[in-house]
Image (cartoon, rainbow, N blue to C red):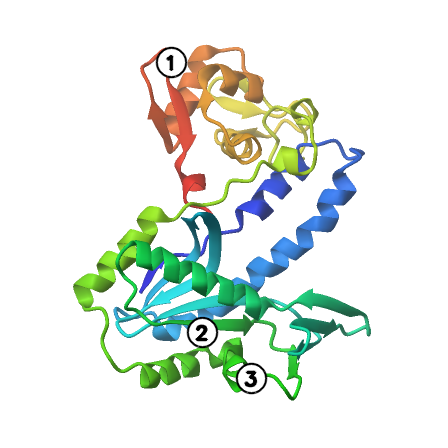
Amino acid sequence: MVIKPRMPSLRVRKQKALLNRISPNHKMRSVIMADLPKWESGYRGEKDVDYYLDFIANEKFHILHDVRLLNNHAFQMDTLIICPNFILIMEVKNWSGTIYFDAQFDQVIRTDENGKVERFSNPLTQVHLQRVQLMKWLQNKNLSHIPIEIALIFSNPKAILKASDDMPLDSLKQIRHLDQIFQMTLELEEKYKKIRLNHVSLKKLSSLILQYDTPLFIDILKTFQINRSDIIKGVQCPGCLKFAMKRAHGKWICPHCSISSKTAHHQAIEDFFLLFNSQLNNKSCRDFLLLSSRGAATRILASMNLIPTGNFRGRKYRYSFIDRVP
């Protein structure tokens, strides 16, 4: 049962919104574009894993994606699987080429299809640290009786996994291709036969983790040192993709190609929240959409699925979808 579904990467959405609203010749455009593929690749790899997780997505297995908890320090897990017998932390890597685990130096050497060699910190060590953090977090909640296992999943089917001869057997069992997920859960069920959580306790633990899940908010302007004044304002035409459409008679009209739309402002509102991580009021809505009419801004804000706070004159809005996106 999927308790917390995997959502589109907030980092990717933020960077795409940023690229769409800075000048084509902005000095940071090439940096943002060069950084984007690694985040897109990571999300694609995580999505590939979901197909194999469907085989265990029943009431006995509670699946939570992109969980970030606080325990003195924040720690984030790609996928957390909770069942009556054990908990499984999964870290997903969408790496290609030949992946060599060097136990002596606790490192990974990757050789890609072009022969390029790169050194990485051992991602298995990272998952071990996540396990320690989760153990401490559960101890603080008086739930230290549940065994925790880890798995490092490689989602690219073409990745070739190799390890040094001195790699511990237990570590080798924790490194898997994505098509081995189902088999791994069967092995763990065989290993942990004692029931630690009944049906009610299982639901309570999943709900508790959801309650304390703390998504990381990224200030994308600060990340790439972009000034707020560099952001292009206005509603983008869905046809010719130019800025900025004009509001007239309850719809948006493009001055460049004359296309009209009643909903073109939806993307602009989403861009505002993606870029600025802040609440939106009538004034900031008018400023960003290049609107002069307070009434038009009020109607636009009321028509969207936003969470309002405050009274009429001081009302502000939050974008509920972003609140739960990892």
Q: Which residue is found at the position 45% from the left and 77% from the top?
A: 181
Q: Amino acid at mark 2?
A: Tyr
Which residue carries the number 1 mark?
314
In x, y percent, where is residue 148?
38, 70
Q: Earlier in the sequence, mark 1 or mark 2?
A: 2
Check disc 1 and give the amino acid type. Gly
Earlier residue among tags 2 and 3: 2
In the image, is 317 to the left or to the right of 39?
A: left
What is the crowding at mark 3: few (fewer than 14 residues within 10 Å), some, or many (at least 20)?
Answer: few
Residue 52: assigned label: 2
Work out whether residue 112 or residue 142 is closer to the camera in this orientation and state it. 142
Residue 45 falls in image quadrant: bottom right
Which quadrant of the structure image shows residue 159? bottom right
Residue 299 position (above or below residue 182): above
Q: Secondary structure at mark 2?
A: helix
Residue type at mark 3: give it. Answer: Pro
Give the Cα distance between marks 1 and 2: 48 Å
The residue under the point 71% across, 75% down is 97
Give the camera-side residue of 152 and 24: 152
Q: Mark 1, residues whose alpha carbon is within 10 Å: few (<14), some, or many (≥20)?
A: few
In this rendering, the answer to whether 63 lies above or below 71 is below
Query: Can you identify the residue that label 3 sits on?
Result: 168
Q: Residue furthest bottom?
A: 165
The kind of secondary structure element at disc 1 is loop
Q: Which mark is residue 270?
A: none
